[in-house]
Image: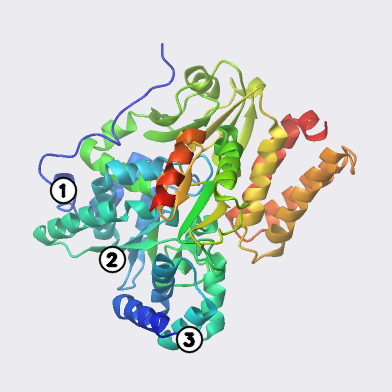
Amino acid sequence: MPEIKELVKGLADKHGRGRESLIPILQGIIAEERYISDAAMSEVAVELDMSAALVYGTATFYSFLDTEPRGKYVIRICKTITCDMKGKKQIVKTLEDLLKIKVGETTKDNKFTLLETNCLGWCHKGPAMLINSIPYDTLDVNKVTEIIMDYIRK
Amino acid sequence: MKNVKRVDIIFGAYTQEKYKVLEQALKKSSDQIISEVIESGLKGRGGAGFPTGLKWKYTAQEKELVKYVVCNADEGEPGTFKDREILTRVPRKVFSGMAMCGKAIGAKKGYLYLRGEYLYMLPELMEELELFHNSVKEFNFDFKIEIAMGSGAYICGEESALFESIEGKRGEPRNKPPYPTVSGVFGKPTVINNVETFVNTMMIMRLGVDEFKKLGTSDSRGSKLFSVSGDTPIAGIYEIELGMSLQDFVDEFGDGDTKAVQVGGASGFCVPRKKFKDTIIGFEGVPTGGSMMLFNSSRSMYNVLKNYVEFFEEESCGQCTPCRVGCQQLKKGIEAVKKGEKSAAYLVTLQKLADTMKISSKCGLGQSVANSFSSIVDNFKEEMIY
C-alpha cells in the first residue's frame, strides 16, 4: 500500500525515528486512518528499524490506538459511574437506534464506530462523549440526536 | 461560621506583564527556591501527597548532567477534572511552575504528559507554549517544554508507567526503587508532579511562604481543587482550604439525601453518612486528588462498586498477577454473591483477596483497589447481597 508507506515516512520525518517517536507516529496514523492496520504496523517497523512485535505490543496497549478497522467518526461514550447516573444508558440507546449498530460496531458505510470508554473528565457535565477528539457534554436525547444528524450530513 | 472555606487563587488572573512571577522566581537561587517550597509544607496534589520540596531537593542533589521535569496531566481518576480546567484556564501557571522546578533542580527540558482524552486542548496549549518559550528566552533561561500525548491508558498516570510511555513503550510500571528522583524518564533524575502542584509552587512564589501557610491546617497546607460530581445540585470545580470535615462538605454540596461520598475516585475511599462528621478531608484524614463523588439514597452501591471494579479490570496493565487476576476475580465474585450463586460469607474471601492485592501488586493501581472495595463492602454489605 503506497499511501501507508508515504504516510509513515512523512510521520517519521516529522517525529524522528527513535523509540520515543513510536507513539507520536502511531497517533499520527490514527489521526489520518482512524486505525492502525497490520500493513501500517509493518511499515512503521521497517521505517523505525525495530521488530513488528514491538510496534504491535505498543499499539495494542493503548485503547485509543485502535488496531481494528474504525469508521470515519469514532464515538466514545463515557461509561464511568457519574455519567452512568446522569443517563448514559439512554444516550447509548439513542445512538444505537440512530446509527443502527450496537456498541463495538461500525456502520456499513464505515462512517461511524460506537464505543464505550472510561472516564473522560467531564463528570460534572455528564453524560459525555468524544467524537474523534472533540468532547460533547451534558448530553440528552435531543442534543445527541442533533449532534449525530450534523455528522451524518457531513 | 462557614466551615467550608472557599478561596480563589489557583484561577486568579495572570499578572499584567507576561510571566512576571516566573521572571522574579528565576532571580532566586536554586537552594532558595527549594527551601521555600519545603518551608511551605506543600504536598503533591495528585493524591499521594509526597512533600514537593523534598522531591525537588533529592533530584537537585543528583550529580547527573541531564535531568528532567515532568508534569503529570494524565488525569484519569474517575471523578477528577480539575487538571483539564487548570490547563484550559491558566496554563501559564503550569509552565511557570515547571520552569522554576527546572531552575531548582538543574534541568533544561520538561515534558507535559497530556491524556489522549484532552487532545482537543492541544492547539491552545501550543499557542501558550510559544509565548512561554519566547519569555524564558528573554529571561536568559534555557528551558524547553514538550507536550507528549497519551492514548487512553489510566495506568499512565502512574509515574513510572508515564515515563515508559514518553519513551515510546507500553505503559507498564517499573519496579521501585530506583525512584524517579534518581532514575526517571530516559533513566535520568526526574521531578514528576501533578498539574495542580506546579501551580501551587507558583502560588508560593507569588504570595510568599507565610501567606501560603495560612491556608489549610498544619498537616495539609494550602488550598485544593475539588472536582465535585454525582448527586449534587452544584457539580463543578471548587477551590477550598484543606482540613474541613466531610459533614461540612456534604452540607455545602449535597442534595440533602447524601448517603455516601467516594473520596479520591475509584482508587479512593467510600465514606458512609454515619462517618461524615469524623472524617477530615486532608492528609491527616482521608487524602484526595480532588475527586468527590456524591451518592444519594436512590443509588445502588453495588452498581457503584461494580462500575469501579470493571474500571480497574480494564485499566490494569496486566503485568503483575495479583492485579490482573485479582481484578477479574473481584468482579466475578461480587456478581456471584449478588446472583446468590455464592453465600454472603464469600465477601470476606473477596476482601482477603483485595488485601492481598494491596500488599503484592507492583504499583498503586493494584494496591489501591482494596480501598474502594473494602470500604464499600464493609459499609454497604446488605446492598452487595440483596
Secondary structure, mark 3, is loop
Return the mark for residue B244.
none
Q: Residues within 10 Å of mark 1 (few under 14, many from 20)?
A: many
In the rendered structure, are the residues bearing label 1 and label 2 in contact, judged by CB atoms less than 8 Å apart?
no
- Quarter of the image with the C terminus of chain B is top right
Q: Along the line of sight, which residue is nearer the eye, B110 or B286?
A: B110
The residue under label 3 is A50
Mark 1 vs mark 3: tell me if same chain: no
The residue under label 2 is B109
Q: Along the line of sight, which residue is nearer the eye, A29 or B375?
A: A29
Return the mark for residue B19.
1
Name the image quarter holding residue B140: bottom left
Tell me where residue B49 appears, x and y as whole percent. Answer: 47, 45
Q: Along the line of sight, which residue is nearer the eye, B42 or B168?
A: B168
Q: Is residue B292 above or below residue B306?
A: above
Q: Amino acid at mark 3?
A: Met
Residue B174, visible in the rendered structure: no
**From the viewer's perspective, is B328 left or right of A22?**
right
Label 3: chain? A
Q: Along the line of sight, which residue is nearer the eye, B41 or B93?
A: B93
Secondary structure, mark 1, is loop
In the rendered structure, are the residues bearing label 3 and label 2 in contact, judged by CB atoms less than 8 Å apart?
no
Q: Residues within 10 Å of mark 3 (few under 14, many from 20)?
A: some
Label 1: chain? B
Q: Nearer the viewer, mark 3 or mark 2?
A: 3
Q: Nearer the viewer, mark 1 or mark 3?
A: 3
**From the viewer's perspective, is B342 left or right of A16?**
right
Write the residue at 63% across / 56% down. Answer: B314
Residue B381, visible in the rendered structure: yes
Tell me where residue B312 appears, x and y as whole percent. Answer: 63, 51
Q: Amino acid at mark 1?
A: Tyr
